Image (spheres, grey):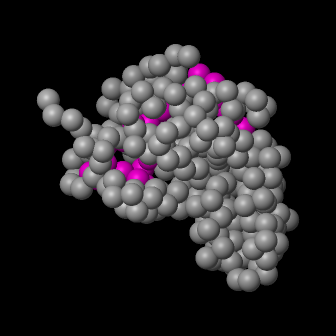
Amino acid sequence: MGKVKDSERPVGIFDSGLGGLTVYKELRGMLPGENLVYFGDTARVPYGTKSAEAVIAFSKEITSFLLEKKIKLLIVACNTASSLALEAVRKISPVPVMGVILPGVEAALRTAPPGGRILVTGTSATVNSRAYSRALAGSGVKVTEKACPLFVPLVEEGWCSKPVSAAVAREYLAPFRGKADALILGCTHYPLLKKVIAAVMGPRTRIVDSALAAAQAARTELADRSLLNPGRRGRSEFIVSDAPERFAALALRLLGIKTGRVAVKRF
Ligand code: DGL
């Protein structure tokens, strides 16, 4: 067999669990020719309540594993890992590494007027890291960050449009209604609650989906490096650290993704 062309090597995507499938789904739709390998750390999810040390250690382990698969680009699809571990991952990766924070921030800045107000939502770890505030510093916008920890379990339960989700969204976000020009969905799971979040925030607030922004940024990165794989027949491989059947069932139920067989890699 001949040598695999660089463009044919897969794009690696990882998340703490299944939430990063929001990034996978955008990317798959945009770039049907790409070979994609997705790793979900289902044995250790959630990351959003863990220490920086733990998230960095997990992220480095997963990166080393995906590098063995000869990936050409790594997307850290988890906002918590992007907030806490991006630099550590870059240090050990010979291939380019992208997080989801910068794409989300750039998309929000295209939306919000100069001097406008941006509300960042995310896990407690993401909000405590202030990664979004740092990325937005100097841009002239006013930033508020709000942790919404109950959103992740609601999505994991598949309760995206139940009344309880709207009630939780009101509890967290009603004080900001009408007061933000843009709201960043700074967590992999939150795009699945976009409708309830938008309803609480009101029509003045643009909702910025960092999963979509990250996928668009990945496409640009691949194009700039002449690494795009053309065509429509890209392969998808899914690997998790535990409970592959549950992952496959939720991927289908929440995102309509047919994973096929999901492999298991335990650390
Ligand atoms: N993937 C995480 C994030 O985007 C949410 C789930 C978790 O806490 O691990 O922040």
Between 52 and 119, the residue placed more toward the observer is: 52
Q: Quadrant of residue 257?
A: top left
Q: Residue drawn 24% across and 38% down?
A: 4
Q: Viewed as shown, does residue 121 lie left or right of 111?
A: right
Counting from the top left corner in percent of width and height, residue 136 is at 74, 65
Q: Residue drawn 14% across and 29% down?
A: 1
Relative to 75, say whether 120 is above or below.
below
Whether residue 173 is visible to the viewer of this picture, yes or no, is: no
Relative to 60, say whether 231 is above or below.
below
Look at the image and give the residue range highlighted in magenta. 24-48
Counting from the top left corner in percent of width and height, residue 57 is at 67, 27
Q: Is residue 34 magenta?
A: yes
Counting from the top left corner in percent of width and height, residue 97 is at 53, 46
- In this rendering, the count of numbered labels is 0
Task: Tell which residue pokes out farthest to the left in this image.
Answer: 1
Task: Tell which residue pokes out farthest to the top in this image.
Answer: 266
Q: Viewed as shown, does residue 120 lie left or right of 96?
A: right
